[in-house]
Amino acid sequence: MGFLDKAFDIAKNVATIVSAEIEKSANEVREIKQKYERLNDEELLRIVNDDRFFGKTQKEKGIAFSILKKRGFDPEEINSLKT
């Protein structure tokens, strides 16, 4: 097996790993979004403004923020409303 064959195999393996991670992340976002869309506005505001050390992740906060915007909240309003 020549150098180019090995390089191609490595590149193919890396692409497979990256693709799997992207799919895993997309599935995680989809699951969180489905879960959060069932929450009321107050619960979503609590998630967005959770500043505890072991609080929600930035991904979770971003999804909650996006849902609130879709529901008609202004971004400044979301950030100013502490529950």
Image (spheres, rainbow, N blue to C red):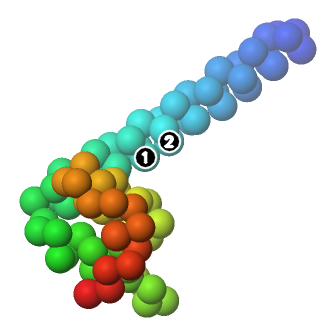
- Kindly indicate whether the residue at mark 2 contacts the one at mark 1 (C-beta within 8 angstroms): yes
Does 15 appear above or below 30? Answer: above
Q: Residue at x 65, y 21 (%)?
A: 12
The residue pinned by badge 2 equals: 21
For the residue marked with disc 1, what is the amino acid? Answer: Ser
Determine the residue positioned at 47% across, 66% down.
58
From the top left corner, tell me how far across and down residue 56 is, in percent: 38, 75
Q: Position of residue 70 (x, y in %)?
A: 25, 49
Q: Nearer the viewer, residue 63 or 72?
A: 72
Q: Report the side of 46 relative to 22 (left or right).
A: left
Q: How many C-alpha atoms fall within 10 Å of the one at disc 1: few (<14), some, or many (≥20)?
A: few
Q: Quadrant of the C terminus?
A: bottom left
For mark 1, give the secondary structure.
Answer: helix
Cα distance in 3D space between marks 1 and 2: 6 Å
Q: Is residue 62 left or right of residue 71?
A: right
Q: Is residue 46 above or below residue 66?
A: below
Q: Residue at x 11, y 68 (%)?
A: 40
The residue wearing badge 1 is 25
Which percent across, then down, holds residue 81? 32, 80
Query: Residue 65 lies in what quarter of the image?
Result: bottom left
Q: Quadrant of residue 26?
A: top left
Q: Quadrant of the N terminus?
A: top right
